[in-house]
Image (tube, helix red, strand yellow):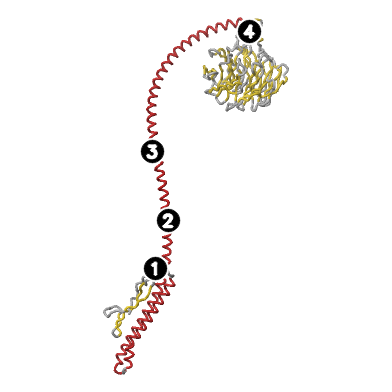
Amino acid sequence: MAHCKCPSRQGKTILVLREHDQTQSHGKHTVGQRTWAVPNQNPQIVVVKSKRSPDEIANEAIKHALKALRKRHLLEEGAHAPAFVALSRPFASQGSEWKEKAENLELELQQCYKAQEQLSEQLVVDVAECRTSKALVKEKEAVITDLQNKVTQAREENSRLKEILVEKTKAIDLVVNKNQTLTAQLEEMAVKAKNAEAENKMLIDRWMLQKMQDAERLNEANAIYEDMVDRLKVNNLEQLSRQQVDGVVRQSEAGAEYFLESSFPSACNRKIHAHEGGCASISFEYTSDMLISGGQDQAVKMWNSDTGMLSRTLYGCLGSVLDLTVTHDNKSVVAASSSNNLYVWDVGSGLVSHMLTGHTDKVCAVDVSKVSSRHVVSAAYDRTIRAWDIQKGYCINTIISHSNCNALCFSMDGQTICSGHVDGNLCLWDIETGKPLSEVAAHSHAVTSICLSRSGNIILTSGRDNLHNLFDMRSLEVCGTFRANGNRVASNWNRSCISADDNYIAAGSTDGSVYIWSRIRADLVSTLKEHTAPVLCCSWSGLGKPLASADKNGIVCIWT
């Protein structure tokens, strides 16, 4: 009989006793007619998963082992019964046999005890291994649960990605369809563009032919114009020689006025501290000796040139006054400001009637039409020239020039704008269309001043090259150049002027002097010294006298 472990139906580990035949050889011990098999030292352990705890399983195994030992003990007692019977027989006859059997049984009993001890130790080891295996099983179950959760999440993510893939596939199909439609449209447009290019080429050929014809006609017109200009020059010389009558110059154009003959001044009659920080612009009212000045103190002031008394101050300008003009009816004053705006004052009330906005940089020049008191032009450092209606208070036309304009004026008929630019060019513009009519290089440096004569036939320009040029308004030909050794232009907005009878030219200088030239004699006739700062502007009264000048310190001098 031997002990071995086998799993029960409930997943328990139990000990089983078996009888072995005499034919078994390993670990055999013979007692009487029976052969007992001693169990191997390392029996195979089969662990069956059970829902019971390891302690319960161990206790159950111990109980079964004890039952097996009791059963074996009973069987051994039954096996030893013949020995006890034999012992009751005569000792002498069976002494040696009994002694041998007793020794064999004692040896077998010792081996059984050793086997029992080994089984008990193995049982303890198996219980410990069972607990360890149970812990590992729990860990593996946790890992399996985690992996199952991850698999579930992966399946959900896969489902979501499949839905997105379906949506993207639909979107791609839609884009492909649109692309095919656009490709078809592109091909159609390419065909149209090819046809348009052919038509354009044909039109260009026709246009070039037409331009050639226009050029021929223009050449003929230019020839006629040059002939007429030559004739007019001859006629004007005859008319000027006839206009000198008793010291009065009579203008021959329609609507012209009578002017006293101008004479160059020689002395300072009045010296006025007009503005703080400098006076950049002065102008006389038409047919009046009232002087208007504007300065860096943002004020426009009106002075009586005879007495030198302040008549009125016009407030409301938000920047330095860089240029100003007065309408022909003397009812409105317009000032160009460094605040990018123009300001229109009503002289009667002294209030601002309009603030003209539209320029994006400082406004440096302004002039009013010689025909209408409602039309004004301005130039700013945003490369634009704008025409305004000051009665309605808005811009009626904008001209974009190639360079910044420093000075401008209207022609006598009010249809042309004359502008002087920082590149030294003098330009004529059509005010209705905004297109350039002609352009000439007036100075080698920036043009600083433009002044139109009362007759409208001569235009005076001054430049940073320290030259003062007279141009024929009709042909833009230079008809006079004036210079002096000490004369230096003080700024980009240094204003010079021409007398009412077109005979004298006045210009300020950086040395504080006012230089006067005779147009007829083409020579310097006087140098007026009273200012202590660079002279920025000069203005001649339309009555023939006086002459006014202003400097960088805000001092205005009246010369007679």
Quadrant of residue 10 within the rendered picture: bottom left
Q: Quadrant of the C terminus?
A: top right
Per the image, the residue denoted by label 4 is 250
| Label 3 vs 2, first from the N-terminus | 2
Q: Nearer the viewer, mark 3 or mark 4?
A: 3
Q: Which mark is residue 150?
A: 2
Q: Earlier in the sequence, mark 4 or mark 2?
A: 2
Amino acid type, callout 4:
Arg
Q: Which mark is residue 176?
A: 3
The amino acid pointed to by label 1 is Lys
Name the spot of residue 448 as percent of width and height, x first. 58, 21
**How far apart are the alpha carbons under marks 3 and 4?**
84 Å
Q: CA distance from mark 1 to mark 3?
A: 61 Å
Q: Residue 310: where, in percent of width, then height?
A: 72, 21
Q: Quadrant of residue 58?
A: bottom left
Which percent across, then down, holds residue 93?
Answer: 29, 94
Distance, label 3 to label 2, CA atoms, is 37 Å
Mark 2 to mark 1: distance in Å?
Answer: 26 Å
Residue nearer the viewer, 457 or 523: 457
- Outermost residue toward the front in this view: 9
Badge 2 marks a residue whose secondary structure is helix
